[in-house]
Image (cartoon, helix red, strand yellow):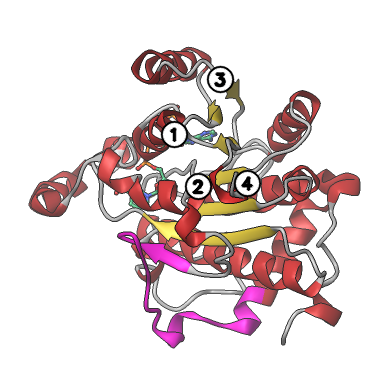
Amino acid sequence: MNDARRSKIILITGASSGIGKRTALALATQGHVIIMHGRNPRKTREARDWVVDRTGNHNVHARVADLSLMSEVVRFSDDIAATFDHLDVLVNNAGGQFGSVRETTAEGHEKTFAINTLAPFLLTNLLLPLLERSPSARIVTVASESYRQGGRPILDDIELERNYSMPRAYGFSKLYVWWLMRQFDARLKAAGIRNVTVNTVEPGSAVTGLQRESLRKTPWMLPLLILWLPFVRTARHGARTSVLMAADPSVEGVSGEFWGNMRRKRINAKWLSEEGERRIWEYCERVCAPYLGDAAVLVGQGEGGVPA
Ligand SMILES: NC(=O)c1ccc[n+]([C@@H]2O[C@H](COP(=O)([O-])OP(=O)(O)OC[C@H]3O[C@@H](n4cnc5c(N)ncnc54)[C@H](OP(=O)(O)O)[C@@H]3O)[C@@H](O)[C@H]2O)c1
């Protein structure tokens, strides 16, 4: 069988609702082994049962972790490594959006940044050894067109202690995670690792639970959202590009790209910054250092290997 067509072991974070749940459904329908991650045990189990009932695929597993905490990301990746001997696909899909007042996690990090940026950075690093054991692995990270909404990145205040606003926090978290994935791609290539690809996707606007918390905390946004409704698609539609990049043979070997609406996206060069990528990588590397352990295969290899 063509390697791109074999059954894969696929981990999807944030699969208890919205786009992640629809991504799990579509990939389970293709017959892959699916690990559905969520933060709420009951909701995650119900989402898993929903996928099993609709697909008849019993190779669907549920796992729970609060990805706003790095300690939980470590426990979660240890759990995955203890259960599966390799991983073919990691879909970093979990994400959050919060209110107009800056909130921090129990570990002291701005919440949006912790879930949307730090968690994918740490989880991807920790799971790399497992991904490397696949003959052909893919990392797919769900960012957003909102990467532009924060304006010019504020690299001397990455966690927005002095400059917080909800649009900035969400927009920068998605810009930074995209930059990190570009770095993963460059560092993997520099390290000669050819069997792991890294791509970023954006799902378009989809009706999901994403704005639930930000709406509760900033109800004045509701009229704006209602005006936006005609342009919003279903979660199933939003999942299409994730599903394509996770398992479709047509994109085998594609790496370092940003896709949306089933196509490679044209990027305005003003959103790319080698200096910015390096600073965000170094910041995440420093913050995550106590949690990275021995699995940190790409950390610290940037200076020699990555194009400056
Ligand atoms: N919807 C859109 O229009 C849109 C547009 C661009 C990008 N995106 C991105 O698409 C991805 C999926 O979002 P969605 O729209 O499908 O929203 P959603 O329905 O709220 O799904 C988000 C998923 O992430 C999980 N999650 C949130 N915080 C978490 C935490 N601290 N720890 C672990 N899991 C956590 C949620 O768990 P619960 O089920 O417990 O809430 C849920 O499974 C996100 O990265 C989002 O930024 C969405």
Q: Residues within 10 Å of mark 2 (few under 14, many from 20)?
A: many
Instruction: Give the residue number, with chain letter if any, for mark 2.
Output: 247
- Name which of mark 1 and mark 4 comes first in the sequence: 1
Instruction: Identify the residue at horizontal 49%, vertical 29% (top origin).
Output: 31
- Name which of mark 2 and mark 3 comes first in the sequence: 3
User: Marks 1/4: CA distance?
Assistant: 28 Å
Question: Quick check: is the Cβ at mark 4 less than 8 Å away from ligand 1?
Answer: yes
Instruction: Identify the residue at horizontal 61%, vertical 27% (top origin).
Output: 65
**Badge 2 vs badge 3, beta-carbon distance below 8 Å:** no
**Which label sits on residue 59?**
3
Q: Residues within 10 Å of mark 3 (few under 14, many from 20)?
A: few
Residue 205 to residue 209: above or below = below
- Name which of mark 1 and mark 3 comes first in the sequence: 1
- Name which of mark 2 and mark 4 comes first in the sequence: 4
What residue range appears in magenta? Answer: 258-277
Number of numbered discs visible in the structure rendering? 4
User: Marks 1/2: CA distance?
Assistant: 9 Å
